[in-house]
Every structure is written in structure tokens, then in C-alpha cells.
Amino acid sequence: MTRSLLVEARNVRKHFGAHHVLKGIDLEVRRGEVMCLLGPSGSGKSTFLRCINHLEKVDGGRIYVDGELMGYEEGTSPKGRAREMKPKQIAAQRRSIGMVFQRFNLFPHLTALENITEAPIGVARHDRAHARARGMELLRRVGLTDHAGAYPAHLSGGQQQRVAIARALAMEPKLMLFDEPTSALDPELVGDVLSVMRDLARSGMTMIVVTHEIGFAREVADQVVFMDDGVVVESGTPSHVIDDPQHERTRAFLDSVL
Amino acid sequence: MSATDVTVQSTARTHDVAAAPRNHPGRWIAAAALVVLCVGWVVSLWSNPNIDHATIADFLFDGRILQGVLLTVGLTACSMLLATALAVALAVMRLSANPVLRVMSWAYTWFFRGTPLLVQIVFWGYLGLLYQSISLGIPFTSVHFFSANTNTIVTPFVAGLLALGMNEAAYASEIVRAGLLSVDNGQVEAAHSLGMSPAYTLRRIIVPQAMRVIIPPMGNETISMLKNTALLQLIAVPELYTRASWISAQNLSQVELLIVASAWYLLLTSVLSVPQYYLERRYGRGAGRSLPVTPWQQARQTVVRLRSRVTQVAHTDPRNPGTEADS
Ligand SMILES: Nc1ncnc2c1ncn2[C@@H]1O[C@H](COP(=O)(O)OP(=O)(O)O)[C@@H](O)[C@H]1O
Ligand SMILES: [Mg+2]
């Protein structure tokens, strides 16, 4: 089965000062596919994820989402190079990409439901009643119907992260990015979040997940990518990369997390 | 068993010993001395033959004084609004990536914080000496859209408003900046990832959170502002203190009118804590702690509690067996 490409990264490079964090990343994610990104801390996984929705500007290479070049207008500068888009255009592009953060980043001054409906009402200009109804539906999906009126400070980490997932889904994204969504959680709360993500994957959502949950990657991922020191070391199906790694660095990493 | 009993008893005994309050004779003597001093001072003020209480009573609600109070309140509100709007702009400029904006914001704060407020007030009051007329047009051309005499536009009220508001903006911008910086950067990233524009993120995500940090010091600034309006006496803005001084220049009851003005300033500054309390409540939502009750809620709770106590008493009242049968 050949599904069309949703995400295409070509030779993505990024440095902070003299520090090369991404040294030419090439990746492809097809529609409906789940890609798990593994790698030691500091290998550039978060930076790559943040380049996809242009929270971080790439220094070289290109990222396409659904055929659109992210953050840049093709060939608009005098030298024929891509020029950065206006903030409004970038904001519009980001609406089709949901992101879930390690530290949840819920808006503390808004209730769970308001967190979910803020962008649909204020940004996508959806009807208020409709947005709230859909927000409640999303809360039901993540198992938090009873907490619609709760402020984030009164929710557990696991509950906050599930609200954060619902918040990202409320903009009806084509693609969901997860940056270590369970790393900040107490062990007993990890399961609930992973099960929400598993359901999401089953529903056909295209997902890129940075995680240290090898079990989750093995079960849910269509493609596993191992990154180290700003390069993709190896990629393939979970059975290849996790169970039969070809590279010493991959093996050493898997030994350390398993 | 008996051994544990013994230890429990002995610790209980030590607790008893520790809980006995110590006597602090020094504290009592100091407190008594202070109370005597204060009472003595108030009595001496009150019985001072140089203070005419009837004059104070006459002028406390005098029409001119009340007009002054009104203008003082209006000036405080308008200057704080102007200052806040300018302060937000200055703080955002200061935090922007554009170096020109950063320097301009810094220079503004440097100038208005570095010169005395009194001097700034006089400067605005005498603006007419510096520029005879004010006109709006395209610089370096003869195109003018509008032109007028400075003294008709910059009335004493406008001069006072500009002086107080622009000076305060310099201080308030630092408060706003600290508030904006107190918001975690993850909030900006989350907002951006949802497709919110920078302006929307500032307005709906950052500012509401920054308010929790901004409001308490801004309450302080508002109280300062209220009192600083008295400085406008210098450029004859007819606010509370100016009116009081005009009256005392006629009837020579300087002290009495100072007391009248002070009483109003005290009342106004006390009243100011009410809106601050409600604003803090409004922006404290979701801050983890439960919200403090409003005085109104407190009153209602007290009424409910008293009523339930009254009905309880009624139920157990032997002379009133009828209520018992009802329940
Ligand atoms: N804003 C930044 N400024 C400077 N260095 C950064 C910044 N963000 C990340 N880095 C550096 O880039 C490297 C990769 O970071 P990151 O992408 O967060 O790795 P990972 O998510 O794989 O742990 C790290 O060495 C980190 O210190
Ligand atoms: Mg990371």
C-alpha cells in the first residue's frame, strides 16, 4: 500500500552558534503513519520536531507538510532563495499541526475546556457553542468529561497531558507532534496518556512521537528512527530498528533505556 | 504497653511545659508607652486651640472641595490609563527583537525616571512658552492638516495628565516588563503551535498571566499617583489640594484645610484597595490556591451561619416546642 507523503524533510540543518544540532536530516512520513523518534538526550530530536512547525528556524534544507514548504516562501528573495513568511502566514500553517509538549504547557488561567476551545474560537473563528460541544467531545475521548471546569493546577500530570492532547486535536490537525509526552509523568500515570495516543494512532492520525517508551514504539510505530548527534543513524520498521539494530550506537542506546 | 504509656505521658508533660506562655513585661511596657503617646498626640491635636473643628466640618463637604475630589479621582484614573497603555507599549518594545525599539524604550525610561516629576510637571505647564502653536503636518514640508495655539490644547488639565501619565509610564513599564518575563516561554510555544499570532498570544495568553504579577505593584503605583496629583497645584490644576490651598489663602485656615484634604486623600487611598482586591481575584484564577472570598460572599456566609445558629437555638428552645414538631 502506497500512501501519499505528508511530511518530507530534506537535508534539514540547524545550529545554535557553533553547535551543530541537526546535520542534515532526511525523513518521510506518510499519511496515517506513526513515526517514533528515538535517541539519546541532546541528539536534536526536540529541535527537529520544533523545526517542523517552525518554532525553530532551519538554517538549511527544507521541510514540507502536505506539499507546503514550512515557514518559507519559495524563491522570493532576490537571490532566488526562500524567504521567511510573515508571522500571520506562519501562524496559519501551524494550525494544521498539533503539538504536545513534555511539560504540557497548558494555559494555567483557563479551565480544561477553555484551554481546548481558546484556539478554535479565537483563531479559527468557530462558533462558540459548536466549539464547546466539540471540546466536550474531545474531553470525553481523553476520559476527562468530569474535569471540564477544572484549572490545570488542580489536575494531575497525566490529566493535564490528556487535556493538552485534546487541545491540539481541537484545531483538527493533519499531523500531531509529540515531544516526550510521558517523560514528566509519574510512572503510574504514563499508561493513560499512552492509551490515548494509541487510540489516536488507530483512528488514522499521522503522528511523529519522540519517546523513550520502547514498548509503545514497538507496538504502535510504523517507522522507527534512531537519531544521534544530529544525524539519523538508522530507520525502519520497529522489528528492524528495535529488535535487530544494525548500528553499535543504536544498540548501546537501546541497552541503556530497556 | 505500660512502657509506651509512660513515654506518651512524659512527652505530653513536656508539651504542657513548653506550651505555657512566657511573660514579656518589656513588651507590655513598650506597648503601653506607645499607646499613651499616640492617645496624647491625638488629644493634643484635638484640643489644640489653633485648630478650629467647626471649620474642618464646614469645609469637609464644601462644594469646591468635592469638585476637587472629583478632579483628583478623574486625574488619577486618566493618568493611570495613559501610563498603563504607554507602559505596555514600552515593555513590549523593550522585549522586542528590534534594537531601535529597545533603545527607544530604554531612553524613554532613562529620561522620565531620571528627572524630577516636579520639573516635568512645570515643563508641561509652560509648554506654551516653548511652542506657541502645535500643528500636525508632514515634517520638512509646508503641508499642515491642523494647527492651534498651544495653550488652548494643552490646558492645565492636559498638561497635568501628560506629566503624571508619561512619568508613571516609565516606572510602570518596568513592572509590566517583569510581569511579561514571569510568564513561562512554554506558554508562547504552546500558543504558537496552536496557530495563534504573536499579537493574539500577547493579548490572550501572556498578559492575563502577567497580570497576577503586575497588579499588586500597580496598586501601589495608583496610590502614589493619587497623592502625586497634589503636585499639580504648581500649575493651577483645580484638584483637591489646589482647591484647599485656594480656600485657605482666603480664610487663612491653613491647618484646617490641610486636615480636610488629608482626610479625603486617606479615604480615597483606602477605597482604592477595593478594586485591587477584585482585580487580584479576577486574575488569580487557576493559580492553584483557592480564591479568597469577596467581602460580599463573606457577609452572605456570615448571615447563613447566624441564621442556622438561630434556627438551632429555636429547635432546642424548650419554650418553643412547635419548631421541633416542624422538623
Ligand atoms: N535554544 C537553544 N539554544 C542553544 N542550544 C540549544 C537550544 N535548544 C537546544 N539546544 C541544544 O541543542 C542540542 C539538542 O537539543 P534537543 O533538540 O533538545 O535534544 P533532544 O530533544 O534530542 O534531547 C542540545 O545540546 C541543546 O543543548
Ligand atoms: Mg528533547
Image (tube, coloured by chain):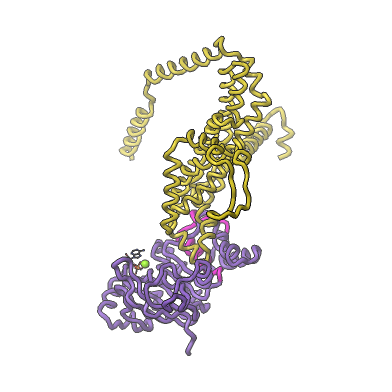
Chain colours: A purple, B yellow
Q: Position of residue A34 (x, y in %)?
A: 45, 78
Toward the viewer: B323 or A178?
A178
Q: Is residue A1 above or below residue B13?
A: below
Tell me the quarter of the picture where residue A187 sits: bottom left
Residue A15 seen: yes
Residue A154 seen: no
Q: Position of residue B18 (x, y in %)?
A: 35, 29
State whether the magenta stretch is mostly helix, strand or loop.
Answer: helix
Residue at figure coordinates x 59%, y 41% from the top left: B150
Q: Is residue B188 above or below residue B11?
A: below
Q: Position of residue B258 (x, y in %)?
A: 56, 22
Query: Is residue B83 part of the magenta span, yes or no?
Result: no
Toward the viewer: A50 or B203?
B203
Q: Is residue B36 left or right of residue B59?
A: left
Q: How many marks?
A: 0
Tell me the quarter of the picture where residue B113 sits: top left
Query: Is residue A152 part of the magenta span, yes or no?
Result: yes
Q: Is residue A244 left or right of residue A150?
A: left
Looking at the rendering, the stretch of residues picked out in magenta corresponds to A148-171
Pick out the residue farthest to the front.
Answer: B142
Residue at figure coordinates x 40%, y 16% from the top left: B29
Q: Is residue B226 left or right of residue A214?
A: right
Toward the viewer: B295 or A74?
A74
Residue at figure coordinates x 48%, y 66% from the top left: B193
